[in-house]
Image (tube, grey):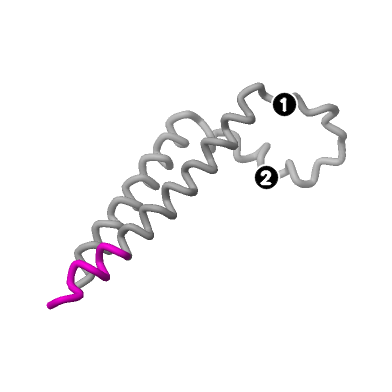
Amino acid sequence: MYFPYFIAYIVIGISISLLVFFWAVKSGQFHDQQRARFLPLRDQDLGPVKVSRFSRWEIYGLIFLACAGLAATAALLLFAAYSHHGG
């Protein structure tokens, strides 16, 4: 059956999600909720936005992660489809 492969895939995805969530909590991403809840209502102009010199590498990294995730999904589907095809 296909279930062990999909269960492993789901467990890996949840594990990575939990690691990222706990990293965000530890690094203080959710620290100032009172300020964050009013940011969309703010009427001021923030001025020019400073672009990080790493923004190009961040975009490449995000594209790489998206492609790696899609490749892992395709590999899992192909492996599950062809590993039990004969029996």
Q: Would residue 40 be found to the left or right of residue 69 on screen? A: right
Disc 1 packing (10 Å; few <14; some 14–19; many ≥20): few
Q: Residue at x 39, y 38 (%)?
A: 22
Q: Residue at x 47, y 48 (%)?
A: 67
Q: Is residue 86 magenta?
A: yes
Q: Position of residue 21 (x, y in %)?
A: 43, 42
Estimate the spatial distance between the alpha carbons at disc 1 and disc 2, rounded to whole Å: 24 Å
Above or below residue 8? Residue 18 is above
Q: Nearer the viewer, mark 1 or mark 2?
A: 1
Q: Residue at x 54, y 38 (%)?
A: 30
Residue type, label 1: Val
| Residue assigned mark 2 | 37
Q: Is residue 82 magenta?
A: yes
Residue type, label 2: Arg
Q: Start and end of the magenta stretch?
A: 78-87
Front one among 49 and 78: 78
Image disc number at residue 51: 1
